[in-house]
Amino acid sequence: MTAYEGVKALLKGQPDWEQVVKCCYEIAPEYRQFAGHYVFERVGWFPSLRTLVKYGILVKQGESTRGKSRAYYTMPDREGVGLALRELGML
């Protein structure tokens, strides 16, 4: 599944993830890698960025840190994510 397809599938079935996907899209250029905590500070509570990994939107980088409680992620296909968000009228 591409990131574009992943955004469409995730937000069709779980529209409450819109803010999280948009936040990741916005902060991806700021940080080479980012943790869920960075998103949490902007959006508030959400279950885990692992959901976005499952849909091909993010990629987990390396091993988790801080006693396995913090993982870092990248968004390798930011253009595909942005295209899907625009087509869904969310950007």
Image (tube, rainbow, N blue to C red):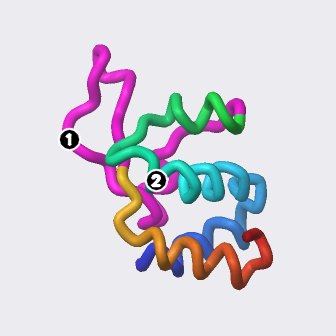
Q: Quadrant of residue 45?
A: top right
Dot 1 or dot 2: first in sequence order is 2
> 88 above or below 45?
below
Highlighted range, magenta: 44-73
Residue at 30% over, 22% down: 68
| 3D distance between C-alphas at marks 1 and 2 | 17 Å
> 44 above or below 55?
above
On-image quarter of the N terminus = bottom left
> 89 above or below 32?
below
Name the kind of residue labelled 1 in the image. Gly
- Judge by depth and name the residue closer to the eye, 86 or 55: 86
Category of crowding for the residue at label 2, using alpha-carbon neighbours closer than 10 angstroms: few (below 14), some (14–19), many (at least 20): some
Q: Is residue 57 magenta?
A: yes
Q: Position of residue 75 (x, y in %)?
A: 40, 59
Q: Which mark is residue 28?
A: 2
> 52 above or below 33?
below
Q: Quadrant of residue 89?
A: bottom right
Q: Position of residue 9 (x, y in %)?
A: 61, 74
Q: Which mark is residue 62?
A: 1
Q: Is residue 67 magenta?
A: yes
Helix, strand or loop at mark 1: strand
Residue at 62% over, 50% down: 23
